[in-house]
Amino acid sequence: MFSLAGADMAGRILGCGDGPAGFNAEATKRGAKIVSCDPIYAFSKADIEARIAATYQLVIDQTRQNQNEFVWKAIASVEELGRVRMAAMQTFLDDYPAGLVEGRYLNSELPSLPFSDRHFDLALCSHLLFLYSQQLDEAFHHSSLLELCRVAKEVRVFPLLAFGGTISPHLETSVEQLRTAGHKVSIQRVDYEFQRGACEMLRIQCADS
């Protein structure tokens, strides 16, 4: 979903709003230098594991009710999706205690991050900005994107659609604000589509502060 190449993985990476995902664990195994930020990391492994168990069936049921909003190719069914996501979350849970000690999982969240300017080469934000357009207002999107540009040399955000499959109402104004601030902004197609129509990312090459 982020069109990551070998060169992208060679620098310092920030994952924002990563939650109980396996990306940090998998990337770390491959030698990447990555930090994930999410308020969920304030909780223990047992607490997060219990929350996953409590919400798993609800998420699966909601996905089944809205199957027409997804592209069932790489993942063929709701049941397979459940297995894939549980495997990814188990990878996270297995890595989480060590990652906390190593400082790879930080209890932090947008729009204020505890890093110095240009601390990261690349910041990634998946399924948070734009997707939650109803829950997170325009001001939050604007301040969050500017904060990501402060701490990283490049920012990539996916997807650009809100829930329901429509383009986020915050996208156009966010792009305008970023360009006004001097950042180079483009929308690029990626070789990934699960939410129907969600096949583009926002790519920001950040100007020096």
Image (cartoon, rainbow, N blue to C red):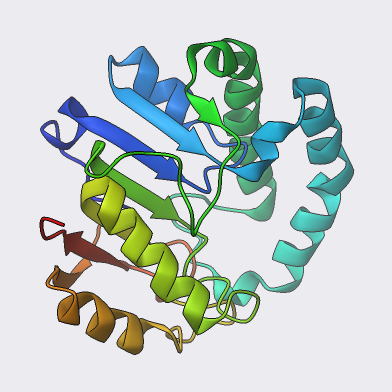
Tell me the quarter of the image containing the C terminus: bottom left
190 vs 199, left or right, is left
* Quarter of the view holding residue 39: top right
Instruction: Provide residue 69's location: percent of width, then percent of height.
Output: 57, 75
Q: Is residue 179 above or below residue 1?
A: below
Q: Is residue 184 above or below residue 24?
A: below
Instruction: Provide residue 205's location: percent of width, then percent of height.
Output: 13, 59
* Viewer-closest of 132 and 207: 207
Q: Residue at x 16, y 26 (%)?
A: 10
110 vs 20, left or right, is left
Q: Is residue 28 above or below residue 133?
A: above
* Quarter of the view holding residue 156: bottom left
* Quarter of the view holding residue 98: top right
Q: Residue at x 67, y 54 (%)?
A: 78
* Viewer-closest of 36 and 21: 36
Q: Is residue 17 above or below residue 198?
A: above
Instruction: Provide residue 169's location: percent of width, then percent of height.
Output: 45, 89
28 vs 138, left or right, is left
Can residue 117 be seen here? The reply is yes
Q: Residue at x 55, y 31 (%)?
A: 106
Can residue 130 be seen here? The reply is no
Q: How many marks?
A: 0
* Viewer-closest of 34 and 75: 34
Instruction: Provide residue 164's location: percent of width, then percent of height.
Output: 59, 82
Q: Residue at x 36, y 28 (%)?
A: 34
